[in-house]
């Protein structure tokens, strides 16, 4: 179930940002180009929350929305459970 939620979250992020996201295994290495453009990465927030999260975080509620990392940094704090980029 958690994998399905993560997949749905990634699909929502792809649609929201208009960027391609590869669905890869947990042992995949990060893409250096993606790290350089870090503000365009997608994290997730809730309407009433104060923190931003990675896809699949156990602290996310059922209703969440994708947000660009650069925008999330201005309004939210990083989650201490999933530890998204700061």
Image (cartoon, helix red, strand yellow):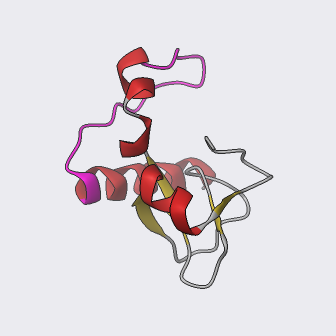
Q: Which residues are magenta?
A: 16-31
Q: Image height check: is 34 above or below 8? A: above
Residue 41 percent across, percent down from the top left? 41, 43
Left or right? Give the position of 1 relative to 68. Answer: right
**Residue most toward the right?**
80
Give the main secondary structure, helix, strand or loop, of the magenta stretch: loop
Q: Quadrant of the N terminus?
A: bottom right
Q: Does 32 lie within the magenta span? A: no
The C terminus, quarter of image: top right
What residue sits 44% from the left and 52% below the top? 70
- Picture coordinates of residue 8, whole percent (x, y): 42, 56
For the point 42% across and 61% down, the residue is 67
Pick whichever, 45 or 78, lies toward us.
Answer: 78
Q: How many marks?
A: 0
For the point 42% across and 18% down, the residue is: 31
Residue 65, percent from left and from top: 44, 69
Q: Residue at x 52, y 24 (%)?
A: 25
Figure check: 52 above or below 25: below
Q: Identify the image quadrant of residue 23.
A: top left
Q: Residue furthest left?
A: 18
Foreground residue, 38 or 58?
Answer: 38
Outermost residue, front side:
74
Determine which quarter of the picture holds residue 66. Answer: bottom left
Task: Name, please, the residue furthest toward the bottom.
Answer: 48
The x and y percentages for residue 47 are 54, 82
Horizontal relation, residue 83 to residue 16: left or right: right
Position above or below: 61 against 55:
below
């Amino acid at each position: 179930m958690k994998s399905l939620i993560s997949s749905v979250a990634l699909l929502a992020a792809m649609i929201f940002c208009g960027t391609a996201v590869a669905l890869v295994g947990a042992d995949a290495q990060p893409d250096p180009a993606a790290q350089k453009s870090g503000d365009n990465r997608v994290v997730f927030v809730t309407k009433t929350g104060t923190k931003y999260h990675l896809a699949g975080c156990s602290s996310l509620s059922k209703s969440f929305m994708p947000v660009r990392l650069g925008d999330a940094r201005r309004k939210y704090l990083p989650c201490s459970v999933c530890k998204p980029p700061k």
